[in-house]
Amino acid sequence: MQPLRGFSFDAVNVFVLRDDLLHPEISGNKWRKLKHNLLNARALGHDRLLTFGGAFSNHLAAVAAAGKIFNFKTAAFVRGEDASPRNPTLTYCRECGMELFFVSRTEYKAHDFSAIDGQWADAYQIPEGGSNCAALEGFTDFVADIKSGMAELPNYICVTAGTGGTSAGIISKLDFEAEVLSFPVLKGGFMKENISKLLSECGQERRLNWKVMDDYDFGGYAKWNEELLQFIKAFYQNNDFALDPIYTGKLFFGVHDLLQKGYFKKDSRILLVHTGGRQGIAGFNRRFLTNLPT
């Protein structure tokens, strides 16, 4: 837990929970969401994990690392073509022993994973992003970490959202009065529905202490502009830790913008969650020829 410096963060009580420091390879929200999925897999006698995601997915890297560390065989269906010679994420997954199956974006959207063969048919399946009811259980520890790490509890908890599982986990386990603000990185306005559906499936549909902030996706997943990149670089100079341009960079930019606009109540305490994802910066730099700090 640490205060933030620079920009509009200096004038208010803004802190960051450094979940990116939870583990060197399974960091941030991936540690939280995978914990009970791995425990369930082991309890059910599974020694194989099968999951799904994009070519630069933090989730795939985390599952691959977890498999290597905790002795599970792993495989993943990857959306799109094999770009592994130029993709640090997929290279890392293979180095961890993960078997990769590539499917077209059309097949992926239709959930056409007919290529699952006998070896993986009985594997423990973890959904894209790791977002299921088991994942929500991992945020009991998250709330405990906030309560032990802050002298005064936050009024707002701000978190980035890809599938909505982290937001749902925080919302479902929060046992003190605070509002959860979820910042989607994909355009489309469907995140509220995603979070509501997951909360409902997991018996938490009556939770009302949350809101989706739809104005900071920068055009969609992996979309960006020069203003975002310059913010990330300047933030690093002020705070000495990196933000990625896919998830955390958009979150921190969004909170900074809302602070400038006077969105938050006076004298409130604001907590941002660094959900990890720094492994994706190298791939982003290589793909877009940028030089973001890692």
Image (tube, helix red, strand yellow):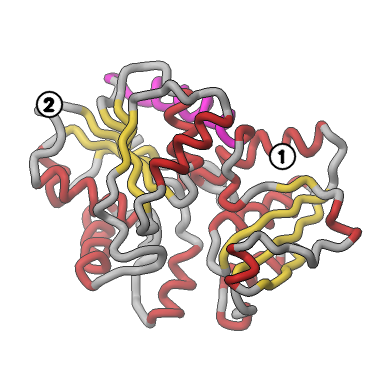
Say which quarter of the image contains residue 273. top left
Return the disc, 2 or 1, that comes first in the chain's sequence: 1
Pointers 2 and 1 in contact (C-beta within 8 Å): no
Give how far apart the Cα atoms at labels 2 and 1 are: 41 Å
Magenta extent:
135-152
Name the chief secondary structure element in magenta: helix
Q: Which residue is mark 1?
A: 38
User: Is residue 137 inside the magenta stretch?
Assistant: yes
Count of numbered tags: 2
Q: Is residue 4 magenta?
A: no
Check the image and report above or below for 95 versus 272: below
Kindly identify which residue carries mark 2: 267
Which quadrant of the rendered structure holds the N terminus? top left
Vertical placement of residue 136 versus 65, above or below: above
Residue 163: x %, y % from top left: 49, 49
**Amino acid type shown at disc 1:** Leu
Kindly indicate the quadrant of the structure image that contains residue 2: top left
Amino acid at circle 2: Asp
Badge 2, how many Cα within 10 Å: few under 14, some, many 20+? few
**Tag 1, which secondary structure?**
helix
Residue drawn at 38 percent across, 26 percent down:
149
Q: Secondary structure at mark 2?
A: loop
Query: Residue placed at 73% from the left, 69% from the top?
Result: 101
Q: Residue at x 45, y 38 (%)?
A: 195
Position above or below: 155 against 75: above
Residue 230, image x, y percentages: 22, 68
Q: Position of residue 105 (x, y in %)?
A: 58, 71
The answer to which of 255 and 81 lies nearer the viewer is 81
Q: Residue most toward the top?
A: 176
Nearer to us in this view, 275 or 172? 172
